Image: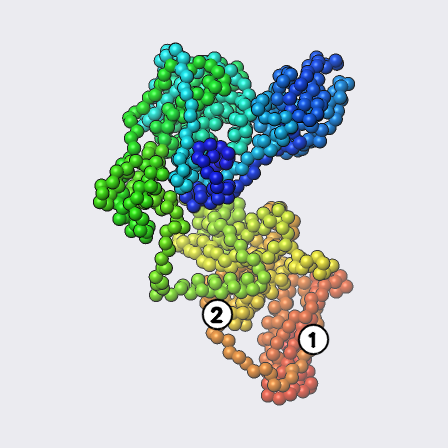
Amino acid sequence: MKVPLSWLKEYVTIKASSPEIADILTMTGLEVDAIEKYHPPFSGIVVGTVTDVEPHPNADKLCIPTVSDGTESTQVVCGATNCRKGLKVAFAKTGASIQEADGTTFKIKKSKLRGVESCGMLCSGKELQLSDDGDGIIELPNDIPDGTDLAEYLSDTVLDISLTPNLGHCTSIIGVARELAAISGKTLKYPSFSVKEGTEDIENTATVSVENTELCPRYSCRVIKNVKISQSPLWLQRKLAHCGIRSINNIVDATNYVLIEYGHPIHAFDYDKIEGHKIVVRSAARDEKFITLDNVERNLPNGSLLICDNEKPIAIAGIMGGKNSEVGNATTNVLLESAYFDPSSIRRTSKSLALQTEASRRFERGTDPNNAPIALDRLSAMITELAGGEMAKGIIDIKDKPFKERNILCRFSRINKILGTQLAVNEIYTIFTNLGFAFTWDNSDTFDVSVPTYRNDITGEIDLIEEVARIYGYNNIPKSSALFSSSKIPDAPIFLFERTIREKLLAEGLQEFISCDLISPALAEIMEGNGITAESVVKVINPTSVEQSILRTSLLGGLLQLIKHNLDHGTKDISGFEIGRIHFKDNGLYCEQSCASIVLTGKTHPYHLEDADTSVDFFDIKGIVENIISSLNIRDITFPASNLTTLHPGRQASIIVNGVDVGILGEIHPGIQSKLDMPQRVMFAEINLHNLFTTQQGTPQMSPIPAFPGSERDWTLTIGKDVPVQDIIDAITAVPSKLLKTISLITVYQSDKIGNDNKNITLRLLYRNDSKTISSKAVDYDHNKIIEETLKSLKKRM
């Protein structure tokens, strides 16, 4: 809710700065999200006076006014019918800037209109985005000095306050002022007004029938005839603009003003459009339809509350009025409605229609039933002041029962015990008095507190204790040091293992991501084929939306959404990980496992470091996986080719650790990238942490540095393009040798010179004798034997 500071200070006198006021309100539970400077969307516009008006010689609908800004007079050409001598106007001088509704800005320049020079422009409320009135120029109050910068005049400091659902009593300027007065010890000043009634009795002008008193415990209305619809005065437009509300006309603006001021929604009907001049409050019939003010035909939920006349619905109670009874330029008589509706009923209807308004937000939180006639009188007095008219004598006020204040007993000793304070009785007296609560004291230990009807959030003693804490100040309550007690239950091993893996992934320079466990059916379908069948997918029984209706069977779906979002917003280089749970059904049992997933896309180095293309590839993500697993003292790691539908057919592998399948890695399938409209390759790896946890080795044992030198031999051979290098390494290690220590892949070479279906690989084999210096002859013998036996083995396989 937006609260203009100047408006707030009309009800409570306080000299604190805006940051100090924001801090006071935040500490009482009204969180101030921002302190904004409201500035109208224009500049260079000043207040001027029309000193003379002449007819345009070449156009009947134009005139030539002379405008004074207090220092000089300027000639302009104007087409407004209300332009006249002596009028205070918004004068856009040459060079002024005005922002249009679509966000574009144009500057005022000298121009000629039908042969007459115009050195500026006289502005309407619509052109200044202050109102919807574009038929004439805006008429400013006579007390504003000429030359005043209009943007500065209309500016104000606005507090943007976030209200929780229990703070219905603060959804108004008066409500916020009441809180500020209570905490600062100031006096709350209510607006003063007088209701001037005519001679015609209201019983002769309108009747009201409430058929459902359970959903509408109170309904009040007044009738005002012979009003004149016009644009609102600048002070009213200004206050509404500060609250983010655009001016419509004086009647509608007055209802919005009282809504913001008192927090009680009031609706104005065109009296002459009400059949029989009778109001009927009833529940909607099955399949009943209604066209609301936004010109949308809505299917009304069965049992929702309606405001009707003798023939038809004219409003959805507490939410929005109807097109068939709206106040327009031709309106001369109005019926004003002020009611109290059941909050749960308004909430159900609003949610069912997916229609939330300023009125419904307040009714849902619970308004004050005793405030309904007060706000109605305030609006009636305001309309007769702004639009004239004759108010019918009396008020129709139908209520099911009197609305009494709630009496709650609150123990003095309990207050200090709960809060850990040593407050005196007089301090509690002061707090309850500042809050506006009437009370009696039994001179022993009990306060009997009468809670005002606008405080529907206070239902018990603990709520009154919370009020004492708020007003006394949370910062003033002493903090006692907590007694440390450590649980004897040890941490779950998988939790500690997740923390270890997280630390290792962060050490690799990856950023941690967090995505939702719930995904859409479309993403779930992408996951199928990786050992996940449609039957194993866990669906949510009552999802909040289709997009979050299935529990993920892999972290891939959420990470793809994350990458897609970042690519769409210009972030193209992404390297991160997520540790989370996956969910599936196995033989009818619901299962949950912990996984760690890695995603890479974009460049591996900044552009200025390398000229060549350095996009991430299969080996980048494979290297990260190897680093993580090797750091767990695991040496037996292999990456056999896999055949998963989510990954590129020729760029994927399984992760096998000590003979256990712990995960997958590879490049996302081009078809999935195309479906998600991702223009660059994405590398992905997923490790099942439960499986990896079982393969951990013990504490690593130090081994001495070899005392004798080794000897290396390189072997280059040509193999098929699709033959995994691991197959060659496995064939080599299958040949018995006491000297061979390590095998390393040096290069992979592909060219049309060796054939498009072939590739050359170079392997480096390290030989060493641990007890003596190895001879070249011994190395050559073992090396040649290994090559010979390996080639024989490969020929048999192929």
Q: According to the image, label 1 marks what residue?
A: 714
The circle drawn on residue 696 is 2
Query: What's the CA distance linking mark 1 and mark 2?
Result: 33 Å
Q: Is mark 1 on a helix, strand or loop?
A: strand
**Which mark is in front, 1 or 2?**
2
Instruction: Say whether marks 1 and 2 touch (CB < 8 Å).
Output: no
| Residue at 50%, 17% in the rendered image | 387
| Left or right: 168 in relation to 133 | left
| Residue at 40%, 34% in the rendered image | 188
Q: Which amino acid type corresponds to the residue marked 2 in the rendered image? A: Gln
Q: Which amino acid type corresponds to the residue marked 1 in the rendered image? A: Asp
Q: Is mark 2 on a helix, strand or loop?
A: loop
First in sequence, mark 1 or 2: give its number. 2
Q: Spot the residue most to the bottom.
A: 772
What x and y, as percent, mark residue 324? 48, 19
| Residue at 51%, 59% in the rendered image | 596
Q: Which of 629 and 586 is in front in this view?
A: 629
What x and y, as percent, mark residue 99? 64, 32
| Left or right: 301 in relation to 664 | left
Q: Is residue 132 visible?
A: no
Q: Which of 58 and 765 is in front in this view?
A: 58
Q: Is residue 515 visible?
A: yes
Quarter of the image for residue 411 reads top left
- Number of residues whose C-alpha sits closer than 10 Å to that of mark 1, classed few (under 14), some (14–19) or many (20 or more): some
